[in-house]
Amino acid sequence: MSIVQRRKATRSKSKQQQQQNVIEHQNEQNERLHFRSRSATSVAAATTTEAITAASASVNCNSPSPLCCNGMLPTAAANMLNCCCRDFNCHLNTSLGLQLRGSVESHRRSESRQSFLTESSKASQSAATPTSASQKSRSRSRSCSCDDDDDCGDSAANVVDRLKSQSGDIESNAATATQLTVSLHIDLISWALFLLAFLTRFYKLATPPNVVFDELHYGKYISHYMRNIFFFDQHPPLGKQLIAGLVSFAGYDGNYTFSRIGATYAPNVPIFWLRFLPALCGSLLAPAVYKLLLQAQLRRWAASLGGLLIVLDNALLTQSRFVLMESMLLLASTVGIACLLRFQRCSLGSLNWLCSGASAALFLACAGCVKYVGFLALALAGYLLCRHLWNLLYDATLTTRQLWLHALSRLLLFVGIPVAVYLGVFYVHLRTLHRAGPHDSIMTSAFQASLEGGLASITQGQPLAVVHGSQITLRHTHGRTCWLHSHAAVYPVRYKDQRGSSHQQQVTCYSFKDVNNWWIVKRPDRDDLVVGDQPDVIGHGDVIQLVHGITSRALNSHDVAAPMTPQCQEISCYIDYEIKMAGELLWRVEILNRQTEGDRWHAIKSEIRLIHESTGAALRFSGRQLPSWGFNQHEVVGDRDQVHQDAIWNVEEHRYTKTQDQRERERQLLSAEMIPTKRTKLSFWAKWLELQTKMFWQAKQVQSHMYSSQPHEWPLLDKGIAYWLDDGSSAQIYLLGNVLIWYMASAGLLIYAGLLIFYALRRRRLCFDISAVEWRRFLIAGDTFFVGYLMHYLPYFFVDRTLFLHNYLPAFVFKLLLLCYVLEHLEYLLRRHCNAVRGMQLVRLYRFVLLLWLFAVVGIFVKFLPLSYGSKKMSAKEIIDLRWKDTWDFILQKNYALT
């Protein structure tokens, strides 16, 4: 008995010592620095279950309960969930405590959202309310006692059980509500912006009933689509395809010829439907900008302002009312970026993630398929995706496998979908345009032969193999369309620079079909030119002579400088002047694509290089134009640098010589059939590859234009474009933006750049002038709008072609988006850095100034509407009054002058 009593006394003494240690530890905790504060975020139901499981494992362990709340022992899990302790060492600031607290808050919010759906959720809420109240009352007590660890464990276990039960009830209620309800969300601001834009874009849409500016070109292309006639354009065809598909339902047959700007449309041309799709896209641009700004986390008033500014800009209004591509380009780019921002906030693999990503890739691909400048928006999307992936690398919760899934899924979506869309658009293009047309000559002989109605001399009964005695035309394969040509005229004895020539017969490259383009292939060791019963086929490496069909003189070269390119040697047809200058007439045939076409020289498809045997020079098109003595045709030279794109030729027209008599040969050449009849086959990939090459490298450029402008003139609206002028009055359409919007947007760009530099330098010194949330919004605006503006504007400084103001519109839209954020950010700064009374006064004053500015924008928009619609006859004085800058070249009828 004495032993038992001593053990009990020892146990009691040990327990008293433990309680004394607890009190001392509590006092020590109270003296610590409270320096960390974190707010728990709401988590999903699955996270709640995991947190509850972790809590039950923690409170039911055999070891003594850990200390919390500056040394107080937990009597229930409810105290843990509502713990307000900021101590760094308090375990409630760990992920477990935050998850538990966030789970309860999430459950309470879920109960309030579901309370109006079903009676069962109401009952669940009422049942959970006392528990929450009791938990709150217990959490407010700053001390708790526990005499027995088992009692504490049982109490915490009961709380865990109640949380599990509550979570199950909420999930079942949410599932029931989801099955029984359908929610319809209507954004009235989006609809208001759309209706306002629709009214301004569709007002008198068929006015004027004349060809306006680039409708001259796009209208021709649409007419070619209606008649399946091939045409060549330097931009992708999606926009023209969509308009052609629409007007086909309106009964348009494509027979109207767009002859000139200002020409009156024929009565059978559906003007309204030709302009319908660009106007509709221009109307949808305003709500699309509004949604994009919301996705960029701007407040609703700033997003609404962005959509309204789109409506009130005169340049966007003018560009949306005619058969032009910019409105479709801007809409696709805006919607694509908005979907991308939404995509980046979705969880990997969810339905919203897949739909948002696919939509973003689709719209951005469509932007690039309307105009190539649209691919700059896709490049911006690539930049945003890379930034997002870089930020994911800092997320320690993601495994390496998940990071790879993020990267590969984005690569598949934003590379696979655009490539598929691009190829699909051109497949429809080439399948639809299967008839020969006026733009055939820019394509190669094989491409022309694939079109219905191609040259009959290429396809009708034409032999394939080139042999001794073949009559051929040699076409310059890549680059400018022209054929090897000669005529009886000779080179002048001396050129203007006093250099001498050989005075031999001229050889040039001529851009038109002509009888002097014919040459006869001859073996050097044979005297006849007739193809025998067993044709002597010419192959790779064979040496031949080329005899001009009309003059019967052989192609020659020698060490004499070419007329326009003196570093190369002259090409001529040899004339024997009975002097000591023998003819050098031998040429070696090199077939460049013999891996696919074989070693035999074939018409149309074999690409050859002719190498002069004596000097090793290759027959090359120099690209330079001869003066009047050469009839302004193009120069052909011998270049010892043999590997050159302009040294590649192919046989286009081909037939066999049947007679030795020269006069009979000439008669046959002059009476050759030139009417197209039958087409040959060429694969889609071959046609697509050739068309891409021509579009990128051989597109015709406008050399000069009186209304062209330079990129540095665009931000401040220094120069506009005259689109149309009425013949009987001074009514006109002139592309000009809203001056207040353009100047304010330029100022907003500079303000953002200045703030970016200021914040970056201050943050390097650990001075945080704005909150972390606002800094993230600031960076989102910079990555999306500021970088987007630079990517759409700066490349034009390196473009060597004629540019116009409408090239700036994609960059202008990004600048306008950035302006909306800057205006909101300035209001934020007023609220943050001013005291309550003065801050509210400054905010009210700031909003009043913005309102005045908006009224001024509306006034300028209305004042310049006559130049956007072109429906009002204006006097000379009215036009002069609108000329606010000397560089605005408005047009007046005769007898009026701008002074």
Image (tube, rainbow, N blue to C red):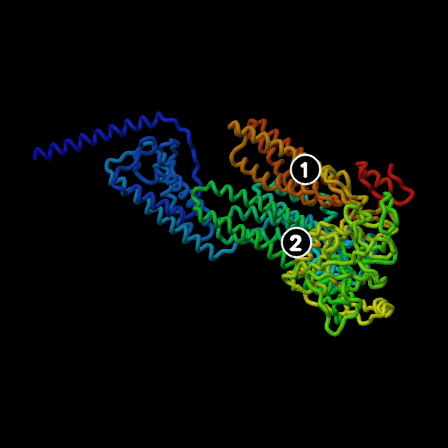
Q: Which residue is mark 1?
A: 745
Q: Position of residue 876 (x, y in %)?
A: 87, 41
Residue at the front extreme of this rendering: 580
Location of residue 342 in the rendering, given as x and y in whole percent from the top left corner: 55, 47
Q: Secondary structure at mark 2?
A: helix
Quarter assignment of residue 223: bottom right
Q: Is residue 572 above or below residue 292?
A: below
Q: Residue at x 68, y 37 (%)?
A: 745
**Could you say which is closer to the camera, residue 88 or residue 431?**
431
Q: Residue furthest top?
A: 31
Query: Badge 2 is on which residue?
Result: 369
Instruction: Assess disc 1: are there few (<14), some (14-19) or many (≥20) residues with their C-alpha within 10 Å of its C-alpha.
Output: many
Of mark 2 and mark 1, the one earlier in the sequence is 2
Residue found 44% across the figure and 41% down from its top:
41
Number of labels in the image equals 2
The amino acid pointed to by label 2 is Cys
For marks 2 and 1, give the one nearer the viewer.
Answer: 2
| Residue placed furthest toward the bottom | 533
Can residue 305 be spotted in the picture? no
Classify 320 as above or below 555: above
Tell me the amino acid under the disc marked 1. Answer: Ala
**Residue 45 screen position, x and y as percent:** 41, 48
Q: Residues within 10 Å of mark 2 (few under 14, many from 20)?
A: many
Q: Is residue 504 visible?
A: yes
**Label 2 to label 1: alpha-carbon separation:** 28 Å
Numbered mark located on residue 388 in the image: none
